[in-house]
Structures are given as C-alpha cells and as structure tokens.
Image (tube, rainbow, N blue to C red):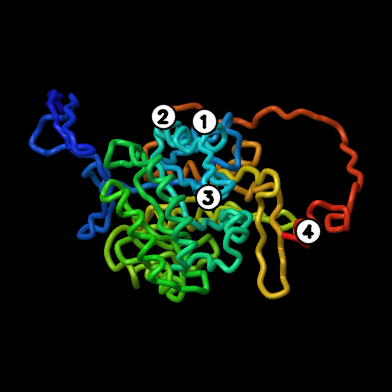
Amino acid sequence: MWSLTTLLVTTLAFGSAISKTVNLPSNDTEWRYGFEVDYENNQFLLDGKPFRYVSGSFHYFRAPRQYWRDRLRKMRAAGLNAVSTYVEWSFHEPEPGQFNWAGDADLVNFINIAQEEDLLVLLRPGPYICAERDLGGLPYWLLREVPNMKFRTKDADFMRYATLYLNQVLDKVEPLLRGNGGPVIMVQVENEYGSYKACDTEYTDILKEVFVKKIGNKALLYTADGASASLLRCGFVPGAYATINFGSGISNVTNTFQIMRLYQPRGPLVNSEFYPGWFTHWGDTMKRVKTKPVIKTLKEMLAVGASVNFYMFYGGTNFGFTSGANGGGNVYNPQLTSYDYDAPLTEAGDPTDKYFAIRDVVGLYLPLPNMSLPTASPKGNYGPVLLEPVQKLLDSQSPFAVIRTTG
C-alpha cells in the first residue's frame, strides 16, 4: 500500500528558482508521471507500469462544446480508456495570426473534460490532418498569402506558418502532457504522410524537431500510416513511434502487423485508425460496415496485445462549409455535412448495437467502469421542411463566383 510523504521540490523555471509542495508516494520505487515504450517487452508503460489503450476518435470541432462531456462519458462507459482527436489548424487560425481558443475551439477545456471523465488523450495536431475536412484542415489563406506555397514540404513559407501554429498548440497543451501529470500521452507528427506524393523527409525531420522542443519526453511522439510498406517508407519519421491503420477488411491481423514491424521492429503493436464505419460522399448511399467483421478483427487485435484506436467512435457533424472532398484526376467526391461514419455512437450521440458489441469485447481485456449505460436521446418531430432553389452556386451574381473569378 502506498503511503504519502510531503516533499519540498525546487525547480528551475525561466531562470529563477520556484519552490512548491507536492505529495509523492513513498516506497522503494521512484514515482513519476510518464508515457513511454518498453521495447524489450513490446509494451507501453504508463507511469512506469505496463499499459495498453483502447481509444476512440472524437473530434471536438465536430460537436458543440455542450455535448463534449456527454460523448466522452459514453465512450468511457464503453470501456475505452482514451480518446483521440485531431487539432484543426483552420479552425484555430481562421486568419493569419488571429488565433481562437474559446468556445467550441477551447481545446484545453476538451482535454480537461476528457481527464475528468477518466480518459487519456491522443493528440493529432497535424499541421495537415485530412479528416475529410476542407483542405485537410489547412487554412485557406495560406494560398492567398503565398499562392505558390508547397504544402507539407520544407517550403520556407509553409514551415514558417506551420511552426507558428504548432507552437500555439503545444504551448496550450504543455501543462496537460503526461509528464506533467496531464492526460496527453501521445502526440502525432503530421498525418499519414506516406500517402502524400512529396515524400519530403527533410520536412518531417524539421517538423519532428518542432515537437521535440516543446514536448521533450513528456509525451510519446508517433506517426500513423496505412498498412503498406510503401506508405511507411515515406511516413516513417526517425524518433517517432511508427504505427499503422487498417479496418476489418483484412484477412490476417498478425500478417498485417508484420508491415508495422518493417519499420518498428520492437515495441507494442498499434492500430491507430481501426475503422468500424466509413464516410459518405454526396450522391452515395449511406456507408455501412457490419458489426460482425468489426468485432472479429477487434478480438484478434486485442488477443495479440495490440493497442487500438477506433476511427471514428463518434463522428459528429461537418458544420458550415468545413467538409472536404476526395478526388484524383477528373474525379471529385465531396463529403456530406454529416460525419456519422456509421460509428458506434451516431451523429446524435446514440449508442448502437455496434457500441454494445464493442463494449462486450473490450470488457474481456480492460476493466469496465461502474457507470450507467447510455440510451438513445428523445427526438422531436418537426414535420416536413420545404427546400426551394434560390440561386445557382456559380452564376454571375453569386458571391462564390466572385471569389472564384477574382480570388
């Protein structure tokens, strides 16, 4: 049993000594907060003890802040012990140097609520996040300021703006890093960079150093790429822990994780984006992923000791014109306003059969919290809503047409 002893700790900060009183456990093992990799035993260590996470993605910018606690609590009730979120650059810096960290953009509040709901945090600040968002989360004004800017490369202008943004994020979250006693255990460097044609390893190395200067060893830096050796070739960043992404369509979990081992020969197995659903384009039928194969793959991953993050566990909504598009060549497939994703929690925050099936499996490997299970919220009936055409999007009188032709 732990006994507490009060120690006077003197630390050096900003060139001056500061004394503070803290309570630390007193026994033969030195107590410390931290999150690291035990390479010898292929496991994570949380505060020095073996640990694995079952996490779920929930992007705070896809739900009004009034719903954050509700969604996070429902995730914890499913047995999850962590939440993963992107940080969207365009959301926080809508114009150059004009940063917004209040209201629905209060990232610190979101992380604090996660900690209050007994969830650790995996942070994905980009600068590019994809996430089926407009320009992958990059601010539109980058191209206005420097029309020839080369995104996601060592281009001096891109790095200047990206570094200013990342320093803002990292300054905000620094007190919340696990090494400081906070819930943020992992921070991602870029996002699925192996899928980007530039393959600029100088860029990713420079970017990693931006993170290292602010984070040090107080959280674990990591990367996430598709389960392909060709994707890991450009996505791997020396000094960051390499993980992979895959859904339930694979035939063999063990063989798939061997791809990760090509670049991460030791350490815990991690699926950073396990897809229990999928996104839908305008004009498509709503995408659905059946529960049975999701559960089968989840069981296989947990049986080999892997840590898993569901992408998405709660999808939410692309408000305004924030949804992005997929494309290539002459193909352009815009995303829906809804980001329901056929996730375990619906866009309305209701639990599905998939939610409860996942909870049953997680409960075989992690202790389930003693808390009430969520139920569907009551719905109103507002009757039919008549929509009428107002104006063609790109006609000569449209403000979008003016932007298109003069911007």
Q: Which residue is mark 2?
A: 116
Describe residue 53's horizontal placement relative to residue 278 as left or right: left
Disc 1 element = helix
Question: Which is nearer the N-term, disc 3 or disc 2?
Answer: 3
Residue type for callout 2:
Glu
Query: Which residue carries the number 3 mark?
Result: 89
- Element at badge 4? loop
Indicate the amino acid at tag 4: Gly
Q: Amino acid at mark 3?
A: Trp
Q: Is residue 280 in view from this perspective?
A: yes
Q: CA distance from mark 1 to mark 3?
A: 23 Å
Classify the position of the C terminus by image quarter.
bottom right
Residue drawn at the location 71% of the way across and 63% of the way down: 333
Kindly check if marks 1 and 2 are in contact, taking CB atoms under 8 A apart as contact: yes
Q: What residue is pinned by disc 1? A: 69
Alpha carbon separation for disc pair 3 and 4: 29 Å
Q: Nearer the viewer, residue 17 or 266?
A: 17
Lower sequence index among marks 3 and 4: 3
Q: Which residue is mark 4?
A: 283
